[in-house]
Image (cartoon, helix red, strand yellow):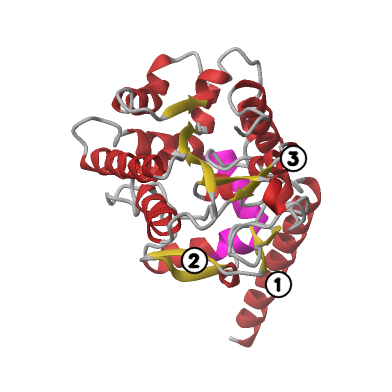
């Protein structure tokens, strides 16, 4: 019996050592793989009514990148300062984790790049992982309506990710299984600690396609998630208009859409949003349309194995597109 236990112990030790060597090798060979997870220290409950927000004056890690907030609870950018505040035109940029830039330092996100390039603009960005249309409405209601636009916002930009259509996964067949029981907790542990897990997912699955296929199903005129999210956008637009604030909606694409950009059926979600908002005075900027004629490797624009969140290259590309095509250096 002792000999049997000894053999098992030796085998487990060898397997563990080999796995450790494999993990070290992958970390060296694939530095672009980021471990999942955002430090809870960056988050604060019920900042915008029942929506969470950013904790002021905080430094934390999000998917391996250092993230810092300012004294007001917005993302902090190195270029930003309190000097000449009265000379700046204030913009409010809303979005979820794609705009927040998980895995990317603040100054390298498209928001940070815009802040750097537009000298006469001061950007307030509370973008946060998990945000949806409901949270955008809560932020606009509090900062602009309830607080009477104390930040003197002149322009409102809502960066729309396709999953902003719902607050939580509406059906049981969602591609995200991290929160499902013990198996989900185990997978979450792997995602936060092992790059081997991320590489295996990349090799044997197409998570980018899975997320797009799941989210596109809600983009129909009959879907209650779509209807409610558009109502939230209508209300944001109405509040902003009442305070003389110009509003733009920027539609961010999924990697799978760019991968097959010539396939018109993959443009369906963006087309439906533009159709629904065509009778309003909100300007809709469709990034997928702007890059139609670009010859670019889609996966290079996103984090490793990720079809939603942009890489450093992706953030830079988005910022350059906006500056070149739609967002004027003249904030007026």
Residue 273, picture quadrant: top left
Specify the quadrant that holds the C terminus. Answer: top right
Q: How far apart are marks 1 and 3 (CA)?
A: 58 Å
Circle 1 residue: 13
Question: Is residue 275 placed above or below 228 in the rendered structure?
Answer: above
Q: Distance between the residues labelled 2 and 3?
A: 46 Å
Q: Is mark 2 on a helix, strand or loop?
A: helix
Give 279 or 303, whichever is nearer the viewer: 279
Circle 3 residue: 119
What residue appears at the point 64 percent right and 25 percent down from the top-left corner? 321
Q: Magenta stretch?
A: 189-205
* Predominant secondary structure, magenta span: helix
Label whose residue precedes the other's in the sequence (2 or 3): 3
Q: Which of marks 2 and 3 is in front?
A: 3
Circle 2 residue: 186
Q: Badge 3: few (under 14), some or many (20 or more) residues near its Cα, within 10 Å?
A: some
What residue appears at the point 66 percent right and 70 percent down from the top-left corner? 57
Specify the quadrant that holds the N terminus. Answer: bottom right
């Amino acid at each position: 019996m002792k000999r049997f236990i000894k053999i098992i112990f030796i085998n487990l030790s060898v397997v563990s050592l080999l796995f450790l060597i494999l993990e070290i090798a992958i970390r060296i060979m694939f530095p672009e793989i980021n471990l999942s997870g955002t430090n809870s220290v960056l988050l604060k409950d019920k900042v915008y009514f029942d929506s969470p927000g950013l904790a002021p004056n905080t430094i934390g890690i999000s998917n391996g990148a250092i993230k810092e907030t300012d004294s007001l609870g917005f993302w902090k950018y190195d270029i930003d300062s309190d000097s000449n505040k009265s000379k700046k035109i204030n913009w409010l940029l809303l979005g979820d984790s794609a705009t927040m830039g998980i895995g990317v330092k603040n100054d390298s996100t498209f928001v940070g790049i815009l802040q750097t390039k537009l000298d006469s603009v001061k950007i307030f960005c509370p973008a946060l992982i998990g945000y949806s249309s409901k949270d955008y409405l809560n932020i606009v209601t509090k900062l602009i309506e309830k607080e009477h636009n104390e930040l003197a916002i002149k322009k409102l930009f809502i960066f729309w990710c396709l999953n902003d259509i719902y607050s939580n996964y509406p059906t049981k067949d969602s591609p995200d299984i991290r929160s499902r029981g013990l198996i989900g907790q185990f997978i979450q542990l792997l995602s936060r600690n092992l790059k081997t897990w991320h590489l295996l997912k990349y090799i044997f699955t197409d998570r980018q396609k899975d997320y797009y296929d799941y989210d596109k199903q809600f983009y129909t005129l009959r879907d209650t998630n779509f209807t409610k999210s558009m109502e939230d956008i209508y209300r944001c637009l109405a509040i902003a208009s009442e305070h003389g604030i110009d509003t733009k909606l920027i539609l961010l694409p999924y990697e799978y859409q760019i991968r097959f950009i010539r396939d018109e059926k993959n443009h369906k979600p963006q087309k439906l949003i533009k159709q629904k908002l065509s009778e309003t005075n909100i300007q809709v900027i469709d990034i997928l349309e702007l890059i139609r004629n670009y010859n670019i490797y889609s996966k290079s624009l996103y984090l490793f194995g990720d079809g939603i969140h942009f890489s450093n290259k992706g953030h830079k590309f988005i910022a350059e597109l906006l500056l070149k095509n739609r967002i004027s250096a003249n904030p007026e």
